[in-house]
Amino acid sequence: MSDNKVNSNIVIPAELLPRDGRFGSGPSKVRQEAVDALAGHWQDYLGTSHRQKTVKSVVGSLRRGLSELFSLPEGYEIVLANGGASYFWDTAVFSLIERKSQHLSFGEFSSKFAASAKKAPFIEDPQIILSEPGSHPLPEANEEIDLYALTHNETSTGVAMEIRRPDGAGGLVAVDATSGAGGLVVDPTQFDCYYFSPQKAFSSDGGLWVAALSPAAIERARSIASSGRYIPPALDLVTAIDNSLQDQTYNTPALATIFLMNEQVSWMLANGGLAFSAGRSERSSSTVYSWAESSKFATPFVKDPAMRSKVVTTIDFSDGIDAKLVAGTLRANGVVDTEPYRKLGRNQLRIAVFPSVDPEDVEKLVAAIDYVVERL
Ligand SMILES: *Cc1c(COP(=O)(O)O)cnc(C)c1O
């Protein structure tokens, strides 16, 4: 039994329904064109060896495509391995933090990397800079720090931050871009490591992590590996780098995930790259925020407009309106995954507007929410 609340008397009229009702923050909407393309290769790609050219050429295309999408400078490499962004935190603890890291902690995801670093016995306790949910702190340059852990988009609260190296800092800048990458603009000279998963803006399935690494990050991983520190082989970043340079992964990856992600990157590039994909999310998010600002019952959760995410929007409802009932009623009408992040515990909707989401569907969604609320 699910605990979904629903008002089953409300039937949203067809003209107010988005053509595609998926607004989840991950797994998020996968485009039909990508699934159709995969179906066209059910026999010559799915179920074939990941050590042969058929699959390696898709991995190669994905790596080149991402380098182009992020305009990576000379010497940066796209590296991938199994496990998703959560596994990358542990990989970074073993392979990127030399002695001490600094973490900006402003929600569920950013706090988890900090917690991983705190548990590791072979590095010092991390410095953790906190801020209230709904805002983000800023990094502070400190000569003891050799890795600054930033989060481009905190998916649990809908807060995004601009990625900039702290002034005068010598350490590596490692960015959790799991839900930001591909939907937010970024300057690659401001990071050494920009890591993400395929199931958010890249409209694929979960289970892999992908990272853009600077020469300094690659050098750091190699130097830690040769220092004698124990590193579990499956979490060793050097192993991931060496395999990725040959367009493969250390162990067997999900081939469909790689294919769908490559389709998404090709779609972004064919339409104008990051300016196109981030532009779509910007347009969709401004539809949500302007609707909420002029609404009698809804307000953006993030008070400072500069911190409001353009990929994951969070909208508080006034006390009289039960957001769970709204989300459940939308769900019963085929509009899914607008529920808030559970642990945040607010009376709100969380609406993801990754690049795959059609901005016109977002206009329909806000009209559908008004329709539901008027009839609760
Ligand atoms: C989803 C998410 C993660 C976790 O990603 P997995 O692929 O499930 O490990 C980490 N960080 C952020 C910011 C996320 O949005």
Image: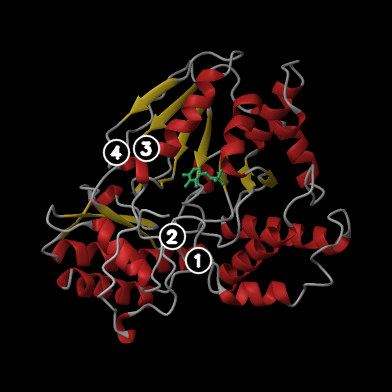
**Disc 4 and disc 3: Cα gap in Å?**
6 Å
Q: Is residue 27 left or right of residue 61?
A: left
Quarter where residue 95 is shown: top right
Mark 3 crowd level (few <14, some 14–19, many ≥20, 10 Å Cα): many
When the figure is inspected, residue 78 is found, relative to residue 146, above or below; the finding is below
Callouts 4 and 3 close, C-beta under 8 Å: yes
Residue 107: numbered disc? 3
Which of 143 and 240 lies nearest the eye of the viewer? 240
Q: Is residue 30 visible?
A: yes
**Disc 2 and disc 1: Cα gap in Å?**
7 Å
Mark 4 crowd level (few <14, some 14–19, many ≥20, 10 Å Cα): some
**Disc 4 and disc 1: Cα gap in Å?**
26 Å
Q: Which residue is mark 2?
A: 24
Mark 2 crowd level (few <14, some 14–19, many ≥20, 10 Å Cα): many
Which of pointers 4 and 1 lies earlier in the amino acid sequence?
Answer: 1
In the image, residue 201 lies at what x, y percent? 51, 59
Q: Nearer the viewer, mark 3 or mark 2?
A: 2
Residue that protrudes farthest toward the front in the picture: 1
Q: Which residue is mark 1?
A: 29
Which of pointers 4 and 2 lies earlier in the amino acid sequence?
Answer: 2
Callouts 2 and 1 close, C-beta under 8 Å: yes
In the image, residue 38 lies at what x, y percent? 70, 72
Residue at x 32%, y 38% (from the top left corner) = 136
Which of pointers 4 and 3 lies earlier in the amino acid sequence?
Answer: 3
Residue 133: numbered disc? 4
Instruction: Check disc 4 and give the amino acid type.
Output: Pro
**Disc 3 and disc 2: Cα gap in Å?**
18 Å
Residue at x 34%, y 49% (from the top left corner) = 158
Instruction: Check disc 1 and give the amino acid type.
Output: Lys
